[in-house]
Every structure is written in structure tokens, then in C-alpha cells.
Image: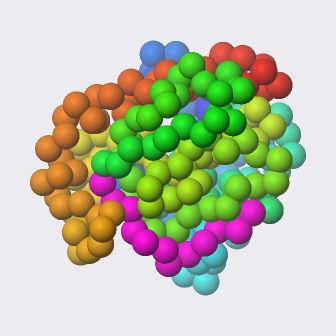
Amino acid sequence: MRVHFLQHVPYEGLGSLQDWLQRGDHQVTATRLYAGDGLPRPDALDLLIVMGGPMGVYDEADHPWLIAEKRFLDAVLAGRARMLGICLGAQLLAERLGARVLTGGEKEIGWFPVQRSPAAADTALAAALPETFMAFHWHGDSFELPAGAVHLGRSEACPNQGFLHEGRILGLQYHLEMTPAGAQALIDCHRDQLGCGPFSQTETQLLAAEAHFNGANRLMAQLMDAFTATNPEEV
């Protein structure tokens, strides 16, 4: 596949998705929006991955490149490519699909369980999504469910943790791709957010969970296999 990913800050990269892409021998390109890179032709890709970042979807005054990114997302949405959004990426996809993104909510930072929704059982992703699984979270904003989307899961702090739209647009509020190095980079940049509320863990709690990282990365690979192995109408 021709895979392109959008990166919003240098410390939020592909994580374990890099391993999945290398195993599949995919052609991978990137746009570093924070560095002013250009965007590809919307029809020149098979899968677009939109990564996370600390900014909000409405922060266009502080990050003017969000304007061009949103136009690009609209163009890809109008085509046939698959799209995966993670955290901020999921919020951007939800917003472009007409849903509201809710800002300034309770921060959810750390390892917390996600419960798969009953509706997810009717998709081809069901076999890759356990009924309950541990995921890495780092967000304050959250999205409402886009019209026509399948609700995939929830956590105690966040009612909408994932959605699937038209079988080819997947939004995940959580980070299954997170590695220990990626978590450390987030901590180094945003340590002041840790331990600030009922759903904000400490640095020790975030990093002392090797089994959680390994399990989440395996689940990320399984989910991507399921997401890309079928026709969108069957997902």
C-alpha cells in the first residue's frame, strides 16, 4: 500500500505502527506539518494515518497549518483511501465528518481500560478488539460520534474512545501504538500534566507497565491487519 502519515509534533511519531508498516513492505511517506512540509495529492495514497498532538482541532490561530490540513482531510475523505486517526487525528476526522470536538474536559493520562461497545461486534474489527483491553491515553479534548459512524468503545473517563465510518475511516482516541520511548518523550514535554486529576497517572505508573506496552502494540498490529485486509464495505 501507499501509506502517508501526518505528524503534528516531532515527539509523536508512528511508534509501533512503524514495525507493522515495515513488515508489510509498504511504501511510506510523511508530512511534518510542524516543519512546513507539503502535502501529497489526495489520490496518491491508499492509507492516510493522522497522528496525535497537544494542540486542539480549533487552534488554527496558533497553528495555521491546520487550515491546509483540514482541506486535505476533506479531499481524502471524498476519495476511497482508508484513514486512521489517533487521538488528535481522530478528533480531526470526527470534526471533518461534522461532529463536535469537546475541549477542556477531564484529562485522561495513563493506562486505563477500554470497553468495546456492542455495536463493534457487528464489524470485521470485532475479532481484533477484545471486549476489554488496556490502552495508553493522553488527552483532554474528546469527540462526539459522527453521524452514521459505528461506536467502537468507551472508558470510564471518555464515552467515545473510537469510531468506524463507512468501513474505511477509523478514529481511535487512545494510543495502541505507544512505545516506552514515545511515552518518555511525551512525559518530557508535558510532565506538568501528570498526576493532576482522577484519571491522570504518575510518570512511574506510565512507564512501569512493560506488559501493557507489549499488549497494546500487539493489539495495534491485529487491528491494522483487520482494518486493511477487507473491503471497506465488510469492515
Question: Is residue 37 visible to us here?
Answer: no
Q: Residue at x 43, y 27 (%)?
A: 219
Residue shown at the point (71%, 68%) measured from the top left: 100
Q: Nearer the viewer, residue 166 or 3?
A: 166
Percent across and percent down for residue 215 are: 33, 28
User: Residue at position x 36%, y 39% from top?
Assistant: 134
List x then y, in percent, for residue 67.
Answer: 70, 70
Whether 94 is among the magenta residues is no
User: How are the colours assigned in the image?
Assistant: rainbow
Q: Is residue 88 above or below residue 121?
A: below
Residue extending furthest toward the right? 78
Magenta part of the chain: 99-110
- Residue 108: say if magenta: yes
Residue placed at 72% from the left, 17% from the top? 230
The quarter of the rendered structure image containing the N terminus is top right
Closer to the camera, 136 or 116?
116
Q: In the displayed structure, would residue 49 be above or below residue 28?
A: below
Locate residue 120 relative to residue 41 in the image: left or right: left
Counting from the top left corner in percent of width and height, residue 113 is at 39, 44
Q: Position of residue 59 (x, y in %)?
A: 59, 77
Q: Quadrant of residue 191?
A: bottom left
Q: Is residue 192 visible?
A: yes
User: Which of the pair 133/216 is nearer the observer?
Assistant: 133
Q: How many marks?
A: 0
Pick the quarter of the image with the C terminus. Answer: top right
Quadrant of the rendered image containing residue 114: top left
Which residue occupies the extreme bottom position in the image?
61
